[in-house]
Amino acid sequence: MHIYGRASARGKRVQSNMGAKNHGVVLHDANVDATLNALVAAGFGAAGQRCMALSTVVFVGDSNPWEEKLVERAKALKVNIGTDPEADLGPVISKQAKERICKLVQSGINSGAKVLLDGRAIKVPGYEQGNFVGPTILSDVTADMECYKEEIFGPVLICMKADSLEEAINIVNRNKYGNGAALFTTSGVAARKFQTEIEAGQVSYSVASYISLN
């Protein structure tokens, strides 16, 4: 608020966010391939080191089929040095960043989260001392866990569950960080509800399929 107030008082257009916990809400009717492609790209692209990276997925209903497919896609990603044109993920920015990422992942495990994919021990041949973290996926994450409350800023995707779209929206709105949120569905009614009720700086919907809001 201080930064926004100072800048806007001088006629500057400002988008001011401190910290990010961007959510993707997945409904049962979402297009499977398009949704998985979007989750993997948004969650692990740039090794998760961007403010608009998708760090949290909220599955409405049965999450197991989604999580299994998500792990398969993430396992196929190639981790290597950033100059390798075939690399999907490069290293994180520093040793301290890697340590912080690994610490937050471990805190989730200690609190009861389930590790579906663990990339903390990954080694890149020839760069064994590099600051690499492979794609990592945690499930059964709850809102009271540190790994959810804090911005991880690494290639870590945490999975949560909700019984309804209303519950998923409440999960997103209760988080103190609200850079962005996305909804994956083929329902125009659900998309309109999400657009109206979600509290986030940037809102995306129908990104996984083509729908009509008429």
Image: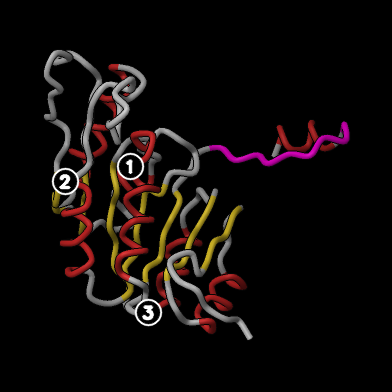
Mark 2 touching mark 1, by CB under 8 A?
no
Amino acid type shown at disc 1: Phe
Q: Position of residue 31 (x, y in %)?
A: 35, 72
Residue matched to label 2: 75
Residue matched to label 3: 164
Distance in Å between CA atoms under marks 1 and 3: 26 Å
Q: Position of residue 62 (x, y in %)?
A: 22, 75
- Few, some or many residues within 10 Å of mark 2 (<14, 14–19, 20+): some
- Few, some or many residues within 10 Å of mark 1 (<14, 14–19, 20+): many
Residue 65 vs residue 17, the one in the foreground: 65
Distance in Å between CA atoms under marks 2 and 1: 11 Å
Q: Which residue is pictured at 25% across the width and 56% down the height?
A: 141
In this rendering, which labeled residue sits more in front, label 3 or label 2?
2
Q: Which residue is pictured at 11% across the width and 29% down the height?
A: 121
Q: How is the image coloured?
A: secondary structure
Residue matched to label 1: 44
Helix, strand or loop at disc 3?
loop
Q: Earlier in the sequence, mark 1 or mark 3?
A: 1
Q: Is residue 34 magenta?
A: no
In this rendering, which labeled residue sits more in front, label 1 or label 3?
1
In the image, residue 126 above or below residue 22: above
Residue 132 vs residue 172, the one in the foreground: 132
Q: Which residues are magenta?
A: 10-18
In the figure, is residue 97 to the left or right of 3? left
Residue 24 vs residue 106, the one in the foreground: 24
Helix, strand or loop at disc 2?
helix
Amino acid type shown at disc 2: Lys
Determine the main secondary structure of the stretch shown in magenta. loop
Amino acid type shown at disc 3: Ser
Residue 209 vs residue 116, the one in the foreground: 209
Image quadrant assignment for residue 85: top left
Q: Which residue is pictured at 53% across the width and 53% down the height?
A: 180
